[in-house]
Image (spheres, rainbow, N blue to C red):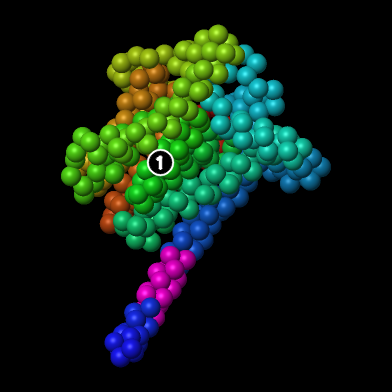
């Protein structure tokens, strides 16, 4: 009894200390995520308002207020162009033709399902889904950068992302917003030790853009950062990481085989849109030719690939090698489809580019000023071209 009596106060103090530590950790966790939510989502909402105003002015001129007042749907019609049309068609009617196989199923499946349940217009639903995906992606990106570099670099990374010239595609019914969301989330999951969950997130990304299966490689490298490489452990980690995306892609191919009798459409459907597998230099020469012939709208595609390669080299030497691999693999994928068309748009989902840019801009004031000074005017130009159906991205 005496031993119990002397031990009880110590145990009580231990329990109190543990409870206090747990409370402090919970408070710190809430504070950290509160900052990420307020800053990441706040930046995205501000960008959404600005892009909407620019799009309306481009489409309807100075009378846009009158146009929208008489026809509220005019405010959303400016976003229903190009790829968004095909996604909306799939959401409403399914895959009615084999050329639509170039658009993987998750984005239209989500929008179509919500529209059927709510009986809402598919374009309205698609814009709501894009808004939610983009806002969450910015919150998660902020948190990911915050873990390594602090709040200033995290804010910069989100700002630089949203001022990239093709960031407008986070605002409309294209797949890039969802790919960005799942890509950033998969890295956060892997860094928290949730390997299977990271694999599921990669599977979701691959069902938005098939090439997103490349995430498996940098995520495996991310897992082994600070750990000793062992083949047995690599297999144990690689299996739950790779199996979900492989199963997702296989399931998509099987569906295409059943629907159109050709499972290879998962790769060959891009041929309907002028793409086919080719050595990287074919696309690079195409990009250089666009600049030489003053097709400057497409110039951003080449600039984006150059930025990806430069950022990959920097990340390999000074940052996380998992980021470097994602940047390099993305550049390889974008340049292996015979043309560089849309590489600028695809780049918006390659989030390590903006982490590298933020890490440099936080130490170099001139770079922090140069990025928006150059890219915001370009973004306004591209947004106006998109809103008036002159550019598809």
> Could you tell me which residue is drawn at 59 percent across and 14 percent down?
259
Vertical arrangement, residue 11 with respect to residue 213, above or below:
below
Residue 175: horizontal and vertical position, in percent?
53, 33
All told, the count of numbered labels is 1
Span colored in magenta: 16-30
Residue 321: horizontal and vertical position, in percent?
25, 41
Crowding around mark 1 (Cα neighbors within 10 Å: few <14, some 14 to 19, many 20+) is many
Residue 365: horizontal and vertical position, in percent?
31, 56
Q: Based on the picture, tell me whether residue 1 belongs to the magenta stretch.
A: no
For this rendering, which residue is in front, 296 or 334? Answer: 334
> Could you tell me which residue is drawn at 54 percent across and 16 percent down?
256
Q: Based on the picture, tell me whether residue 20 belongs to the magenta stretch.
A: yes
Taking the view exactly as shown, the residue that stands out farthest to the front is 1
For residue 348, what is the image quadrant? Answer: top left
Residue beneath disc 1: 196
- Report whether residue 9 is seen: yes
Vertical arrangement, residue 383 with respect to residue 90, above or below:
below
Q: Is residue 257 left or right of residue 278?
A: right
Q: Is residue 246 left or right of residue 107?
A: left
> Could you tell me which residue is drawn at 44 percent across and 45 percent down?
185
Name the quadrant of the N terminus.
bottom left
Residue 103: horizontal and vertical position, in percent?
54, 24
Q: Main secondary structure of the magenta part?
A: helix
Q: Is residue 148 left or right of residue 45?
A: left
For residue 76, what is the image quadrant? Answer: top right
- Report whether residue 318 is seen: no
Taking the view exactly as shown, the residue that stands out farthest to the right is 70
> Could you tell me which residue is drawn at 60 percent across and 50 percent down?
49
For this rendering, which residue is in front, 314 or 392? Answer: 314
Q: Circle 1 sits in a helix, a strand or a loop, which is it?
A: helix
């Amino acid at each position: 009894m005496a031993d119990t009596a002397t031990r009880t106060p110590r145990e009580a103090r231990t329990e109190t200390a543990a409870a206090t530590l747990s409370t402090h950790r919970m408070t710190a966790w809430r504070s950290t995520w509160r900052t990420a939510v307020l800053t990441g989502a706040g930046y995205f909402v501000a960008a959404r308002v600005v892009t909407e105003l620019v799009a309306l002015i481009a489409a309807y001129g100075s009378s846009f207020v009158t146009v929208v007042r008489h026809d509220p749907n005019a405010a959303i019609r400016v976003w229903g162009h190009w790829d968004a049309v095909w996604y909306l068609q799939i959401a409403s009617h399914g895959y009615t033709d084999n050329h639509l196989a170039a658009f993987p199923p998750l984005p239209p499946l989500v929008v179509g399902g919500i529209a059927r349940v709510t009986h809402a217009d598919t374009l309205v639903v698609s814009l709501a889904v894009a808004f939610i995906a983009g806002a969450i992606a910015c919150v998660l990106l902020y948190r990911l950068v915050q873990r390594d570099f602090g709040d200033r670099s995290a804010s910069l990374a989100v700002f630089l992302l949203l001022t990239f010239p093709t960031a407008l595609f986070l605002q409309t019914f294209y797949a890039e917003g969802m790919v960005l969301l799942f890509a950033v989330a998969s890295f956060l999951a892997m860094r928290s030790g949730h390997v299977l969950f990271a694999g599921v997130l990669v599977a979701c990304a691959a069902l938005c853009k098939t090439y997103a299966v490349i995430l498996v490689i940098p995520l495996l490298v991310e897992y082994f950062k600070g750990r000793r490489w062992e083949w047995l452990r690599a297999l144990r980690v690689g299996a739950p990481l790779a199996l979900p995306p492989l199963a997702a892609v296989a399931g998509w191919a099987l569906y295409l085989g059943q629907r159109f009798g050709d499972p290879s459409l998962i790769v060959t459907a891009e041929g309907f849109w002028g793409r086919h597998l080719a050595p990287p230099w074919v696309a690079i020469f195409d990009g250089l030719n666009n600049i030489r012939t003053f097709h400057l709208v497409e110039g951003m595609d080449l600039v984006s690939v150059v930025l990806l390669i430069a950022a990959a080299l920097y990340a390999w030497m000074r940052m996380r090698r998992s980021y470097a691999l994602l940047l390099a693999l993305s550049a390889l994928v974008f340049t292996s489809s015979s043309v560089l068309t849309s590489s600028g748009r695809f780049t918006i989902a390659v989030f390590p580019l903006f982490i590298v840019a933020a890490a440099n801009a936080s130490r170099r004031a001139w770079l922090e000023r140069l990025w928006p000074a150059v890219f915001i005017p370009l973004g306004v130009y591209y947004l106006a071209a998109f809103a008036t159906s002159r550019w598809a991205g």
